[in-house]
Amino acid sequence: MCLKNVPGTNPPQEERMVISMEIFLYIFTCITVFMFGGCLGSFFNVILLRVPEKKDFVKTRSHCPECKHTLKWYELVPVFSYIIQHGRCRKCMTRIKARYLLMELFCGGGCLWVFMALEFFRPHQTIIGLLLFPVLVALSAEDIVKTEIPYWCSITIASLGIIATVLSLFLPSDVLWYEHLIGMLLISVPFAVFCYLGAMGGGDVQLVAAAGLLLGWAIVPSVLIGMVTGGIFGVIVKITKKRATICFGPFLAFGIAAGYLYGYRIIQMYSSLMG
Ligand SMILES: [Zn+2]
């Protein structure tokens, strides 16, 4: 008697195989997505460090700033190379800045967050998210270090916004084409007034306009999340370190990230609560 086909007697081996395969594929995709984000983080680090020094960041290969040793491919694997080399150059043993590791970790983690939240339900939204999150990490890093949001970050987000607006004409999307345009003006116009009055930096206005174009109505919860988290942090800093100002960029970036993934759900929840 063949037990294989008798229901209830033999565990469905084929089904188990399919489940194992699905788990393997999911983990493999998670690792690939993390590495993709890590590579972008590594690249953005090079841009942020070389552009102010007017150095080429495309043709010049990655090298140790101390001994000029050109890095091999296995010294450029995001996160892992840093850990394996104990954060030092393999040639001269000079310490590599922790900033490299942090950028790769945050960009990889950001991309992983996008994939886990959206998977590939609407592939174009996931791909745009995978490009958006590392840019948000890069602008946060630069705002923390230099208290300014790089121009190219807002331009990149605006470009993603234009792509999303065009795609919304052809593909199913949470945001309609005209909502992208409303999003661009909704918060950036009042922010521009604050900027004119000197209460806000011009970089924040550009970022909010660019992110609004990408997010549509979801820019509202994004900015609120940024303001609330930034406000709480600001109060803590004022009490503990007696410092008056904090950079708003990282909080705004966090709000935009959360708004991109959950903005419309937050708006729906708010609408249903309000009846
Ligand atoms: Zn070196």
Image: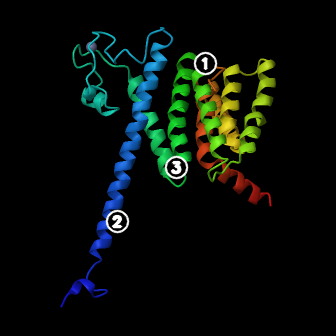
Name the quadrant containing residue 84: top left
Local crowd size for mark 3, using a 10 Å CA cut-off: few (<14), some (14–19), many (≥20): few
The residue that disc 1 covers is 148
The answer to whether mark 3 is within 8 Å of ligand 1 is no
Identify which residue, 239 or 259, lies in the foreground: 259
Q: Is residue 143 left or right of residue 75?
A: right
Q: Is residue 174 above or below residue 62?
A: below
Name the quadrant containing residue 78: top left
| Quadrant of the frame with the N terminus | bottom left
Q: Position of residue 53 (x, y in %)?
A: 47, 8
Are the residues flagged by discs 3 and 2 in contact, CB closer than 8 Å?
no
Q: Secondary structure at mark 3?
A: helix
Q: Secondary structure at mark 1?
A: loop
Residue 47 makes an appearance in the image? yes
Residue at x 59%, y 18% (from the top left corner): 147
The residue that disc 3 covers is 123
Give how far apart the Cα atoms at labels 3 and 1 are. Answer: 32 Å
Amino acid carrying label 3: it is Pro
Residue at x 65%, y 53% (from the top left corner): 265
Amino acid carrying label 1: it is Glu
Q: Which comes sooner in the sequence, label 1 or label 2? A: 2
Of the two numbered discs 1 and 2 in the rendering, the one whose residue sits closer to the viewer:
2
Local crowd size for mark 1, using a 10 Å CA cut-off: few (<14), some (14–19), many (≥20): some
Q: Is residue 231 left or right of residue 106?
A: right
Q: Which comes sooner in the sequence, label 3 or label 1? A: 3
| Quadrant of the frame with the C terminus | bottom right
Residue 228 makes an appearance in the image? no
Labelled disc at residue 19? 2
Q: Is residue 272 above or below residue 156?
A: below
